Every structure is written in structure tokens, then in C-alpha cells.
Image (cartoon, coloured by chain):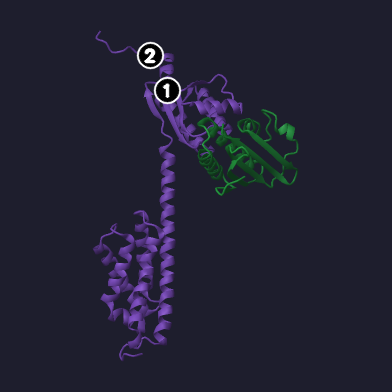
Amino acid sequence: MTTSDDVEIPIATGDDVVRVRQATRTAAGAARLSLVDQTKVVTAASELARNTLVYGGGGEALVSQVTDERGRAGVRIVFRDEGPGIADVDLALTDGWTSGQGLGLGLTGARRLVDAFDLETAVGQGTTITVTKWRR
Amino acid sequence: MTQPGSAGQTRIAQLLTEHRDDVLGRWVAAVAGTVRGRITERELRHESEELYGLLVRQAADGPAGTAADELRSMLADLSRSRARQGFTPSETAVSVFALKQALFSLLEEKADVDADAKTYREFVLFSSVLDDLGLHTFETFAAAREQVIADQAESLLELSTPVVKLWDGIVAVPLIGTLDSARTQVVMESLLQTLVDTGSRYAVIDITGVAAVDTEVAQHLLKTVVAARLMGAECVISGIRPQIAHTIVTLGIEFADIVTKATLADALAHVLRQSGVQIISGGQA
């Protein structure tokens, strides 16, 4: 279930990555996540937003507050791009592997920072990543 | 034309001149209602009188006259000063739009006496001129605000990258806010330059004020440390808060052999020890 506080942010510049981060922090604060969990989900959002920008050629992020069937609050962020897609998902999810200039920890690190991580990709069609962090 | 001897003058201009004090009074009252107290009535009256004079001239000359240009530049000044004083766009634009109401209510009252179809046509024309001017105020206002923001952003960039000397041979960079490539570049340059200028051997990079450390920020930090090392300086990263430590570990970032400390004080103590400075609590010798 999503609430009406969804924020959609286009990702086209480095400043947009900051905006995604701020929106995530606001949503995480509103969902009353602990400070550590807030920082984790904000960092994950930052990584994925930058991936969307750098590797996906830009796209958008949808930040929303969610509640599960047991009434637990959380934050969900969906990153969508229509870039080249990821050819080898297993390789992309290997620590230290990067097709660019980074440390190769963004995607895998982000996966470890959140509670739920869902990756859909098709070569030439783009990538959609959905992450969720629940309140403990 | 109703009046002989004023062939070029429009009915509106005539009305504006005839009922000057009445319209002006209503106008000032309407504007004063929205800017409540932040501008004195006298200032407002003075401003409005000046605008009014130009408007009358413009209504008489038409849009091609010199009054139109003067009017625009005066409105631009006005909205710029309003923007800097922190007024909202509506509060600024109302200075122009309120005149329409003042004039219209006057026309309504005088309708039985001397308002005819021609007057109304002129009124419509005049109000579209006012609309234009109102939009002009709006645009200038927005531009002025953007300028304010741009100035602030620039000064923030400078503000947020100071390199301070902590001790003889020890410099520190307290980082605050977002660390992107552009800022890291500035930080790195000023740090390396200060290391040379002061002949310092130790540098402390404090990230207490950095909201989140992701892989990009970490990479920037690592590069800065390596660059400083190449110049023979030792770097310590301080201000690692618990949630940041947690996140860095989960992300899998390794700071390898770089010395990190929880607080700036710890880092200072560490580098002082390294450089052989002894601190003795101040009893009488």
C-alpha cells in the first residue's frame, strides 16, 4: 500500500541525485526509521540514483512511504531508466566489479543496505530497481 | 472625445488625472493590506505616486512613448527590491494588479454619469497593459530570486571548503553537506595547496557534517588522501559517526590503512602524538 506522499523525481543531473537523497531522508524520517536505517536507505538511494544517472543515462525515482500487511512502516524507492540495461546481472552484482570508474560497490552495497531489492532489466530496454527498507 | 483641447488624450488618462487622489488612495490602501507593515504607508504612497504618474503618461502616450520604458525599469527595480526583502511573488505583483481594482471600482461608481462603451473598451485595453506590467514584475521578481539563490550557492561552495590550521604542521578540512565531484576538486586543491603553503605534515579531514557517505564520496576521500600522501603528508579522516560507520561497513568500502577517528578531537590528539608534541595538563611547574 502506498500513501499519497509519493515523490517523483526525474534524474538528469548530479543535483537530482541530491534531491532523491533528500526526498528519501524525508520519507525515512516520516516512517520513523532509526538513524542508522535512515542513513542506510539514504545511502542506498544515493548509489542507485547515481547508477541511474551514470549507467542508465538518466531516468526517474519514485520515493514513497509504504506499510506492509502487518502495519509496519517503511520506505520504498523505485528507480527507472530506459538505458542500455544490464547484460550480465550476476556479474553486475559482484563486489568490486564495475563497468565504469567507481569502486564497484554501489549496486551490491545498496542491495545489502536495504531489506528488499528487486532488479528488472532487459538489454536495450532499461532497468528498474525497487528497494524497500522497513522500520524495525 | 468629450473634452475639447485634449484630442490625443484617452478617456482613461483623463479619468486617472481627474480622480487622481481617489484612485491613488484606493490603490495604496489595497496594496498596504497585503504588505502589512513591512513597508511604511509613506514609502508605499511615494512609490505608488511615482508609478501613477508614469502610468498616466503611458495611458496618454500609448505603449510607444518613453513613459513605457521608464515604467518597466521602475517596476523592475521595485520587484528586485521586494524579492530581496523576502516578499512573495503575489505580494509583489499586487502592487500593479491592485490598481485595476481601484480603477474599476471608480468606474463602477461613476458608471451612471460618464462611463460609456468606449470607456470600457479603453479600460479593457488599459487593464491588459496592467496585466503585462504585472507579469513583467513577476518575471523580474523570479529572476531576482534566482540571482539570490545563485549567489548563495556560490558563497556556500566557498564557505564549505575552508582549510584551517590546527597546530604548527597540522591542517584540517571540516567538510559539510554534499560532497560531489566539483566540491571534492575544490577541497582537494585547497588542501594540497595549504599543505605546501604551511609546510604541514599532517592533515585531518573531518566529515562530521557530511550527511551520507556513499561509494562516490568514499572514492573522493580516498583519492584526496592518496594525493596528500604523494606530497608526503599524512591524512586522518575524522568525524565518523556510528550510522556512517555502519553504512560504510555494509557497503563494503575499505579504508585500508587510512587512520580514521570518531571525533576531530581524537584525530588531533593522534596527529599531535605522531608529530611528537606532548600535552601536559597545566599544573604549576
Observer-side mark, 2 or 1, equals: 2
Q: Which residue position holds label 2?
A: B277
Which structural element holds mark 2?
loop
Q: Which residue position holds label 1?
A: B200
Q: Amino acid at mark 2?
A: Val
Q: Amino acid at mark 1?
A: Ser
Quadrant of the snapshot with the C terminus of chain A: top right
Give whichever of B202, B208 is nearer the camera. Answer: B208
Image hue for chain A: green
**Labelled disc at residue A99:** none
Chain shown purple: that is: B
Give whichever of B277, B110 is nearer the camera. Answer: B110
Which structural element holds mark 1?
loop
Residue B281: x, y in percent? Answer: 31, 12
Question: Measuring 34% from the left and 73% from the top, which residue is drawn there?
Answer: B102
Tell me the subunit letter for badge 1: B
Quadrant of the snapshot with the N terminus of chain A: top right
Residue A118 position by quadrant: top right
Residue B84 position by quadrant: bottom left
Dot 1 alpha-carbon crowd within 10 angstroms: few under 14, some 14 to 19, many 20 or more: some
